[in-house]
Image (cartoon, rainbow, N blue to C red):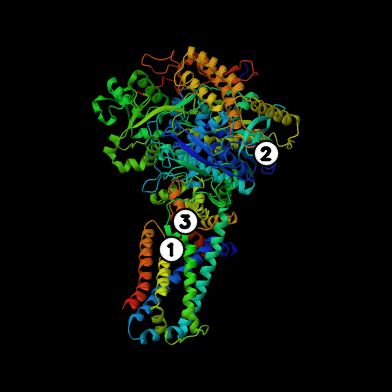
């Protein structure tokens, strides 16, 4: 298959970027999107050019490192997957593909298509955990947990922290990310103990970092590679005022 | 406490509560408007008079006005924050599947705001004496306006836009209030759509019936 | 040859660890904050160790090459984590987990280490549940288990097909909590380039800031490597793109012994290779073998027709299918250990029964399980795995059997460590996959997560104090010391040399070639001639690499090609050591299969008289062969037998 690629190139955080167009041909429909970019990069190096910088690591959809905004959608045209899991058969032969980095104030561009998502780590530092030290914990079966709650907690905990929710949201809001973490812990008896402190601290940190406000458009849910649900955001709102009012 | 008042979620909850208050007011207003269909102006004028003079309603009116203003103020404030949060815009605008009407809330909101100003000029400002007219005969004012085709077009358009606004607003308010669960969310969605169709439909039918009869 | 002192404590095996802890030296709380500990790597081992050390009050610095600690490749582990809880009342015990692990490792692991691993396995589950890891549960609210290869009991705890992710997020949360408290400082997007040794003790590291390209010096009273395995030497593996051997390799060059490099694990259930543009292989969890049945056509002509696309898997009637694992190993069936399952698949494919376009694949069939349990149950158990398979292969595994083939997955070999997890350099520790100790010649499924967390939460935080207790008088050292300067200069020189090659080819060209050599000559089955040829080829490709690659841009900026070249340069050296070790070990054991040493039925044939030892290699210089040191293995609590799963 042949493609025309329009890719955002930017030397560093402060540099002014621009789009460059590249042609690539002879790509197998079974190649993954990132493998297609690998081929492009090897081609650029052999031609004496500079390869396109993009993040990727596990290439099986779980590390959350890859982050490309392809033809107007984070992680590209398919549902429920990251860009590393997307294959070229999802595109038409000869198609023009525009690739942009995640765009959000709290995610500054490092180079080309790489962005700094350290803001997510900062939100987790504010309270995305259960405060227990190693050792001295009760037996794993000491507290039975409703299967339904354990399953819902797992649904939320599946978040890979890729930032597609922020990239997709017209407001660059991080509510889905925060709500996934809050939901995960809130649904478990172990996490309920410090539920109030957690939700207060995480929301305050999210606001401080400059993410936008949620307007319930649902773009985050539509683009989340782990299909995390909007009901988590409702739960976050609920937990938030419960924590402040009661 | 400042972490509560200054929080994005608090602002949104405020937006939602104000919005729901306004949503509750709409059927009351519509109920009174239906009296315009009677050939006798008396019931409508009486109702309007009652609304204008009864102390409880007057108190309610202040609340309503404040709600409008606060809802608009917060709407604009949040929107500006949201634009700033993106930074540089994408070249290709987002194609994600989203609640369609949610994308235009600020614009539909502003159009409704403009309509409100016109509406106020026609009625409320007469009542408080800013604009000339007979505050005891709103029935007459309404019937007069509903015979101007341009006004009817503006009126119908505005309610169409209100429908768009409500189509997202209704469900969204419950989402922000945290009432949406996997089970309830679809219910609010359907109710919201029904509401967004029926209320504007009721409002727009009145001038059309008056004009064509 | 020096004698390797494994420092295994005296006493009966079940009491060794308790005795050790009772008598070891500890550091007082006011002294802990005066001591700096460097941890490299933020996977299960690194994150759990750094968090635990931070909680204890040490001053910890943690490094990772990714943008966030949460991205470490532990996150990709799917199936589960073992523990001897015996919640299922099916006869499990610490001893049985110990026994299974030693047997699974083909009697090439250190007995005392494995027993300790089994002993702390239960604490791990308790710890993770307390952290909020959402393990699978029964309707009664208690934890449930599944079975994994090489065990006759159900002892594997799991969180859907994302157990590694959930465990890592638990450790990551604990780590972030310490970062917020200031006990741990995170240095992300840093690659470790060298180890700094002062007066014979590990005292720091040189890292490259991957964003700015600048080299940085960091001091620590002790250095802990938690940098994972070296499976990426094969180019195609289930490892992440960035997984590399560089930290361990620099430690080796500074004097840490590298043990059993030939022991690599080939995982039987991966999605087959489909093209030479492919960048990595995707694992399908071993848990699939709980319900899936592995088969190839019984008749060669059927297999041929399937390869040509003339026949579909579902066209083959049951009597014409060869469920070869059930046939060869009736006791364990589809749940034989990984090395056995992988070799059996290769044997069938080599004999001409393979399927798929390349003939290098076997079927993993869920038809019977779906009939027996219903599609819903199978979907609940493996839904996300099936979905992943379908996304990659474009085939629906509910309707047609999956195609799988073995792939490089894990490396049992690694830096030699003693009972305290210290390498042969005082003050340098290796935890998790980067060390060699617990899995012998083959690792059982769901044991890697167990080992990483055991080392990080419950072993290292104790044993490191035994060393640090004597370091409380050592003040923090200046990084201007000549040892730091020299190390940085060496790194600068190596990187400049790479930049200076100015050939014309991309690194992938040589990296892929190295991968092919390794797979063909130092892969699933090995022989003397092939290994010797392999060594020649590795040397040739290394030479070409150092003359023909082209790295664009400069040293002092983000340069992904330079990062890759830096890693591949180390792989090119490691590859030779692996082949050398494989050549030295004239027996078949676990993942190391020498064709010359097999039983009449084609099973691995160990040579316990001559090779019951750990081969620890010492670096002697760039052009000198490494020196072999042997740590004899003694089994006092397990009777050494021929490993049989029949």
Relative to A182, B31 lies left or right: left
Residue that badge 3 annotates: A233
In the figure, residue C174 lies in which quadrant?
Answer: top right
Residue C644 in view (yes/no):
no
Q: Which element type, helix, strand or loop, lies under badge 2?
A: strand
* Residue C189 x %, y %: 60, 39
| Mark in the foreground, 2 or 3 | 3
Give the vertical position of C179 relative to C432 (above or below). below
* Residue C324 x %, y %: 32, 24
- Disc 1: CA contacts within 10 A as few (<14), some (14-19) or many (>=20): many
Are dots 1 and 3 in contact, CB under 8 Å?
no
Relative to C209, A206 lies left or right: left
Give the vertical position of C16 relative to B169 (above or below). above
Work out how far the residue at label 2 is from the one at label 3, CA to CA, in angstroms.
Answer: 41 Å
* Same subunit: marks 1 and 2: no
| Mark in the foreground, 1 or 2 | 1
Residue B94 in view (yes/no):
yes
Q: Determine the residue positioned at 41% across, 27% down.
A: C406
Host chain of mark 1: B
* Same subunit: marks 1 and 3: no
Host chain of mark 3: A
Residue C533, numbered circle? none
Work out how far the residue at label 1 is from the one at label 2, CA to CA, in angstroms.
Answer: 51 Å
Work out how far the residue at label 1 is from the one at label 3, CA to CA, in angstroms.
Answer: 11 Å
Residue that badge 1 annotates: B174
Relative to A46, C376 lies left or right: left
Say which quadrant the N terminus of chain A sits in: top left
Residue that badge 2 annotates: C36
* Residue B74 x %, y %: 54, 66
């Amino acid at each position: 298959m042949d493609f025309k690629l329009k890719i955002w190139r930017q030397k560093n955080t402060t540099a002014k970027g621009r789009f460059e167009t590249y042609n690539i041909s002879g790509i197998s429909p079974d190649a993954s999107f990132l493998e297609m970019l690998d081929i492009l990069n090897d081609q650029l190096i052999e031609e004496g050019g500079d390869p396109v910088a993009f993040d990727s690591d596990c290439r099986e959809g779980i590390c959350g490192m890859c982050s490309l905004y392809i033809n107007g959608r984070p992680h590209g045209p398919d549902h429920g997957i990251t860009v590393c899991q997307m294959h070229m058969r999802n595109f038409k032969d000869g198609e023009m593909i525009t690739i942009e980095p995640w765009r959000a104030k709290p995610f500054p561009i490092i180079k080309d298509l790489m962005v700094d998502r350290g803001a997510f780590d900062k939100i987790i530092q504010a309270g995305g955990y259960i405060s227990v030290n190693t050792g001295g914990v009760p037996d794993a079966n000491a507290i039975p947990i409703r299967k339904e709650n354990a399953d819902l907690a797992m649904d939320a905990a599946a978040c890979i922290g890729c930032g597609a929710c922020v990239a997709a949201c017209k407001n660059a809001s991080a509510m889905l990310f925060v709500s996934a973490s809050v939901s995960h812990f809130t649904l478990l008896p172990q996490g309920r103990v410090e539920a109030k402190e957690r939700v207060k601290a995480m929301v305050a940190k999210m606001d401080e970092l400059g993410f936008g406000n949620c307007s319930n458009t649902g773009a985050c849910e539509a683009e989340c590679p782990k299909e995390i649900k909007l009901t988590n955001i409702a739960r976050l709102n609920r937990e938030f005022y419960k924590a402040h009012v009661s | 406490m400042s972490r509560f008042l200054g929080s994005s979620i608090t602002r949104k909850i405020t937006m939602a509560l104000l919005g729901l208050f306004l949503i509750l007011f709409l059927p009351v207003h519509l109920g009174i408007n239906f009296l315009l269909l009677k050939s006798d102006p008396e019931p409508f004028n009486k109702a309007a008079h009652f609304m204008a003079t009864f102390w409880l309603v007057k108190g309610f009116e202040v609340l309503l006005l404040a709600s409008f203003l606060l809802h608009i103020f917060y709407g604009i404030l949040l929107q500006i924050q949201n634009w700033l949060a993106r930074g540089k815009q994408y070249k290709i605008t987002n194609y994600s599947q989203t609640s369609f009407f949610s994308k235009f809330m600020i614009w539909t909101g502003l159009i409704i705001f403009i309509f409100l100003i016109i509406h106020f000029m026609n009625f409320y400002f007469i009542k408080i004496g800013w604009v000339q007219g007979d505050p005891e005969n709103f029935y007459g004012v309404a019937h007069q306006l509903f015979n101007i085709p341009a006004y009817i077009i503006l009126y119908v358009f505005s309610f169409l836009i209100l429908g768009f606004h409500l189509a997202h607003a209704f469900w969204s308010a419950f989402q922000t209030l945290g009432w949406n669960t996997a089970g309830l969310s679809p219910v609010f969605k359907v109710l919201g759509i029904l509401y967004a169709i029926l209320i504007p439909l009721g409002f727009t039918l009145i001038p059309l019936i008056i004009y064509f009869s | 040859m020096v004698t390797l002192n494994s420092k295994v404590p005296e006493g009966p095996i079940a009491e060794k660890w308790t005795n050790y802890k009772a008598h070891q030296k500890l550091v007082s709380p006011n002294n802990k904050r005066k001591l700096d500990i460097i941890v490299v790597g933020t996977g299960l081992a690194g994150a759990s160790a750094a968090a635990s050390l931070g909680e204890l009050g040490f001053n910890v610095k943690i490094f990772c090459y990714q943008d966030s600690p949460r991205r470490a490749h532990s996150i990709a582990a799917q199936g589960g984590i073992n523990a001897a809880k015996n919640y299922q009342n099916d006869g499990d015990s610490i001893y049985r987990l110990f026994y299974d692990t030693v047997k699974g490792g083909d009697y090439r692991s250190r007995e005392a280490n494995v027993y300790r691993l089994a002993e702390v396995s239960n604490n791990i589950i308790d710890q993770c549940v307390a952290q909020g890891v959402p393990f699978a549960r029964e309707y009664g609210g208690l934890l449930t288990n599944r079975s994994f290869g090489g065990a006759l009991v159900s002892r594997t705890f799991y969180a859907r097909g994302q157990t590694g992710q959930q465990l890592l997020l638990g450790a990551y949360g604990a780590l972030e909590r310490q970062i917020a408290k200031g006990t741990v400082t995170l240095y992300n997007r840093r690659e470790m380039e060298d180890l700094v040794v002062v007066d014979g003790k590990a005292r720091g590291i040189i890292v490259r800031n991957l964003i700015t390209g600048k080299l940085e010096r960091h001091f620590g009273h002790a250095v802990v490597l938690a940098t994972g395995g070296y499976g990426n030497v094969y180019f195609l593996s289930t490892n992440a793109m960035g997984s590399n051997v560089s930290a361990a390799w620099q430690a080796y060059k500074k004097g840490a012994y590298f043990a059993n490099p030939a022991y690599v694990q080939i995982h039987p259930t991966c999605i087959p290779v489909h093209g030479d543009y492919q960048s990595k292989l995707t694992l399908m969890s071993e848990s699939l073998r709980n319900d899936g049945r592995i088969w190839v056509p019984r008749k060669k002509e059927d297999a041929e027709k399937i390869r040509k696309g003339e026949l579909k898997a579902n066209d083959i009637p049951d009597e014409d299918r060869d469920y070869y694992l059930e046939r060869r190993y009736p006791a364990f069936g589809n749940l034989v250990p990984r090395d056995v399952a992988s070799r059996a698949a290769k044997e069938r494919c080599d004999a001409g029964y393979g399927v798929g376009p390349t003939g290098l694949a076997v079927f993993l069939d869920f038809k019977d399980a779906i009939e027996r349990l219903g599609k819903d149950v199978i979907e609940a158990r493996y839904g996300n795995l099936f979905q992943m398979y379908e996304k990659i292969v474009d085939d629906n595994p509910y309707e047609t059997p999956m195609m799988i083939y073995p792939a490089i997955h894990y490396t049992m070999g690694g830096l030699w460590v003693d009972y305290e997890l210290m390498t042969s350099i005082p003050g340098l520790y290796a935890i998790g996959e980067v060390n060699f100790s617990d899995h012998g010649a083959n690792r059982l499924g769901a044991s890697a997560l167990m080992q990483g967390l055991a080392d990080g939460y419950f072993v290292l935080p104790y044993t490191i104090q035994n060393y640090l207790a004597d370091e409380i008088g050592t003040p923090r050292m200046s990084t201007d010391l000549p040892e730091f300067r020299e190390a940085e200069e060496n790194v600068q020189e190596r990187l400049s040399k790479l930049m200076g090659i100015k050939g014309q080819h991309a690194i992938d060209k040589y990296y892929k070639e190295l991968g092919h050599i390794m797979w063909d000559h130092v892969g699933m089955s090995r022989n003397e001639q092939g290994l010797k040829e392999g060594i020649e080829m590795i040397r040739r490709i290394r030479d070409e690499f150092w003359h023909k690659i082209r790295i664009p841009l400069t040293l002092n900026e983000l340069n992904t090609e330079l990062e890759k070249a830096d890693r591949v340069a180390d792989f090119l050296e490691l590859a030779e050591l692996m082949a050398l070790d494989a050549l030295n070990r004239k027996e078949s054991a676990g993942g190391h299969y020498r064709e010359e040493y097999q039983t009449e039925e084609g099973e691995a044939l160990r040579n316990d008289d001559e090779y019951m030892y750990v081969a620890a290699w010492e670096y002697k210089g760039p052009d000198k062969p490494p020196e072999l040191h042997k740590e004899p293995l003694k089994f006092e609590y397990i009777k050494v037998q021929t490993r049989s799963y029949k």
